Image (cartoon, helix red, strand yellow):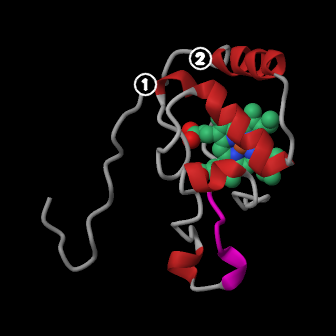
């Protein structure tokens, strides 16, 4: 998704959100400028700092930035707190991960 959608918001300069051109840096397409993969919001309390450049340290501030830059809204602090509490509730066990055994590279069949 594009981020920031509303680049005139003060957060954009404060957190230098448009220094990196996002997906366009690899595709060279203007339409991909400032497009980012939206990360999972699960276990968000463990993944600060937020956004592609890690410029935002706290969850309430990330919520303010999102409301401003993506919805062109300034939320009352009570709603920022409610949304942050909801996002904190997305905390849970990390799934156990096992490393895959990849097939050998063609032409290099050694184990
Ligand atoms: C109040 C509503 C919203 C909340 C609470 C919210 C919350 C968040 C949070 C906490 C992150 C940071 C995730 C991380 O870095 O680990 C994030 C990233 C992102 N969100 Fe939102 N979001 C909202 C609305 C939106 C909307 C409406 C859009 C799209 C139109 C959007 C698009 C994105 C994108 C593209 C990112 C990744 C940005 C980057 O990595 O720089 N969000 N969101």
Q: Is residue 92 visible?
A: yes
Quadrant (top left/top right/bottom left/bottom right) for the N terminus: bottom right
* Cα distance between the residues tagged 2 and 1: 15 Å
* Residue 81, horizontal then vertical, whole percent: 74, 16
Q: Which mark is residue 91?
A: 2
- Check mark 2 vs ligand 1: CB closer than 8 Å? yes or no: no
* Residue 32, horizontal then vertical, whole percent: 67, 75
Residue 18's place in the image compared with 26, above or below, is: above
Label 2–label 1 contact, CB within 8 A: no
The residue depicted at 57 percent of the width and 49 percent of the height is: 14
- Is residue 34 found left or right of 2 in the rendered image? left
Range shown magenta = 30-36
Residue 35's place in the image compared with 106, above or below, is: above
Q: Is residue 41 visible?
A: no
Q: Nearer the viewer, residue 55 or 30?
A: 55
The residue depicted at 76 percent of the width and 23 percent of the height is: 80
- Check mark 1 vs ligand 1: CB closer than 8 Å? yes or no: no
SS at mark 2 in the image: loop
User: Circle 1 is placed at which residue position?
Assistant: 96
Quadrant (top left/top right/bottom left/bottom right) for the C terminus: bottom left
The residue depicted at 77 percent of the width and 22 percent of the height is: 83
Residue 54 among magenta residues: no
Q: How many marks?
A: 2
Residue 35 among magenta residues: yes
SS at mark 1 in the image: loop
Mark 2 or mark 1, which has the lower sequence index? 2
- Is residue 84 found left or right of 18 in the rendered image? right
The residue depicted at 36 percent of the width and 34 percent of the height is: 98
């Amino acid at each position: 998704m594009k981020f920031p959608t509303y680049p005139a918001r003060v957060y954009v300069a404060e957190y230098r959100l448009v220094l990196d051109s996002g997906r366009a840096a690899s595709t060279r397409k203007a339409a991909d400028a400032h497009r980012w993969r939206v990360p999972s919001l699960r276990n968000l309390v463990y993944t600060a700092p937020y956004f592609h450049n890690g410029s935002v340290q706290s969850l309430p501030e990330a919520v303010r930035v999102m409301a401003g830059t993506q919805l062109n809204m300034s939320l009352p602090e009570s709603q920022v707190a409610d949304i942050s509490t909801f996002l904190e509730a997305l905390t849970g066990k990390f799934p156990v991960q096992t490393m895959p055994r990849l097939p050998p590279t063609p032409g290099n069949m050694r184990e």
